[in-house]
Image (spheres, grey):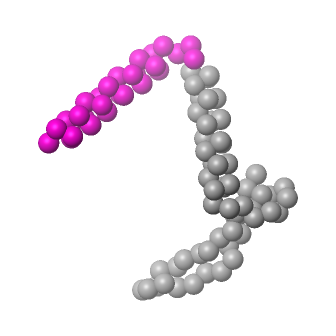
Amino acid sequence: MLHAIYTHERLIGAGLRYAERVIQDAATGVPLTDTEYLALVRHRRTQEAAAKRQSKAGDSSYWTRRAAASARARERLLQFEST
């Protein structure tokens, strides 16, 4: 589990707030680098995607709709690239 600590806030420009944060491992309290944090996020998203695929494994109508949407997206991309 992750825990974000906002170290300080300051104003930038015309009243824009900027919060600097440090991401920590909630169990150990050890600060994480950006690379470590992004690796954890990627790992979590991969696990969630695998769980969704597994839950939809027997749903043929879902995969048919998904394939059709993918084909439409490819067509739009090709049309955009040809202009």
**Is 67 placed above or below 25 here?**
above
Q: Quadrant of residue 58?
A: top right
Stretch in magenta: 57-83
Could you say where residue 69 lies in the image, as x and y percent from the top left?
Answer: 35, 28
Q: Residue at x 14, y 42 (%)?
A: 83
Could you tell whether 50 is left or right of 64 in the image?
Answer: right
Q: Which SS does the magenta portion mostly show?
A: helix
- Magenta-span inclusion, residue 69: yes
Task: Between residue 61 and residue 70, name the one nearer to us.
Answer: 70
Could you say where residue 42 lies in the image, as x and y percent from the top left?
Answer: 61, 45
Q: Residue at x 19, y 36 (%)?
A: 79
Task: Between residue 28 and residue 15, name the one nearer to us.
Answer: 28
- Magenta-span inclusion, residue 45: no
**Is 75 placed above or below 5 here?**
above
Could you tell whether 27 is left or right of 57 in the image?
Answer: right
**Is 50 placed above or below 35 here?**
above
Q: Residue at x 57, y 84 (%)?
A: 10
Could you say where residue 33 lies in the image, as x and y percent from the top left?
Answer: 68, 62
**Is 12 placed above or below 50 here?**
below
